[in-house]
Amino acid sequence: MNFHGSDIISVNQFDLADVTTLFTLAHRMRGIAKGETKCKLLEGAILGNLFFEASTRSRMSFASAFMRLGGQVNSTTGFAFSSMDKGESLSDAITVIKDYCDALVIRHPQIGAAQEAARYADIPVINAGDGAGEHPTQALLDLFTIFEERKVVNGSTIAFVGDLKFGRTVHSLAKLLTLYQGVNYVCIAPPQVQMPDLLIQEIRSKGFDITLTDDLETGVRSADVVYSTRIQEERFEDKMEFETIKDLCVLNRKIVTEKCKKDVTIMHPLPRTSELSTDLDSMPNAAYFRQSANGVLVRMALFLLLLGRESQLV
Ligand code: NCD
């Protein structure tokens, strides 16, 4: 794809060359991300950071990425403090906000909202999560992390655990992994929140193996990467259903030590609730905090590409 001026709505937009371009640049961001090297490539640029759903990592890492590159960030969080609370439509809001900024990041509870926002903005729009749809930059940083931790993706077995129905990070990463060869998918979830049929079909039609199970202890055995996720309480209409499944796939040190491969990589997009025990945190296999740190590098690289400044990097 031609990154310059593009919107980032879905991982379907990327091919292998795009991922390589992005990750090569992300590696060059380390010194700047730590504040050791000063960068003014985005000086004068303003990011509109629009979060209509809860967020810590995505909101702050997008903002830090932009600011580390010398740009400034103008944000709005939640509907309550925006004019949408007065009934303003998303299209009107974006039509106005686009003239205040050079790029927009949007998180919104409705599937398709980022795509809709992009229709009304003549500046790059990045989907930071549209309901249970996609979260493409999370998938990019997840993939970057798999490479960082394990060096290879081809031939790996990835176990997705938890809420695979509503988990947008799962949807995006599962699709992005189809760019690679011989990836085996193990989807471990209570039947109520298993991977959506359409996504299973899409992945199988590309020739990949997917195993579906609700048995955590058996499911994780063959995994090189275990990608644990939070049950997305906010997406349940029936709160009783949430209560009955919320503690069915809890990953802890005992399971990882006794059932998983010794060199398994444990990932999680965070935030965690009870599904990922804190007794895992001190294990070298626990990659989730390194994963969230990688988000800044990947988002910095993406901003440079979308705003066409990458060639000015010295
Ligand atoms: C995730 C999200 O918002 O989809 N968080 C994130 O962006 N790192 C995962 C979640 O909320 O469970």
Image: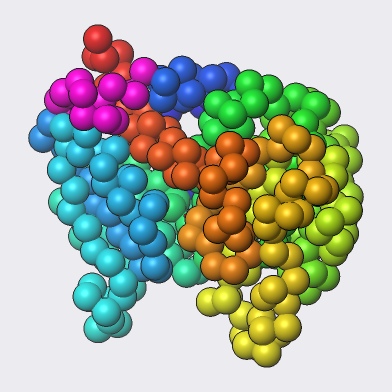
Determine which quarter of the picture holds residue 106: bottom left
**Taking 300 as reference, is 196 left or right?**
right
The residue drawn where x is 59% and y is 29% is 149
The residue drawn where x is 55% and y is 33% is 145
Instruction: Estimate the x, y position of residue 308 in percent, counting from the top left.
Output: 30, 24
Q: Nearer the viewer, residue 109 or 186?
A: 186
**Taking 167 as reference, is 86 left or right?**
left
Residue 177 visible here? yes
Instruction: Estimate the x, y position of residue 19 in percent, counting from the top left.
Output: 55, 26
Residue 169 visible here? no
Q: Name the residue at the left extreme.
A: 44
Identify the coloring: rainbow
The vertical placement of 149 against 233, above or below, is: above
Determine which quarter of the picture holds residue 260: top right
Prevailing SS of the magenta stretch: loop
Could you tell me which quadrant the C terminus lies in? top left
**Taking 49 as reference, is 180 left or right?**
right
Instruction: Estimate the x, y position of residue 105 in percent, counting from the top left.
Output: 34, 50
| Range of magenta residues | 28-42
**Is 89 contained in the magenta span?**
no
**Taking 155 as reference, is 112 left or right?**
left
Q: Nearer the viewer, residue 8 or 179?
A: 179
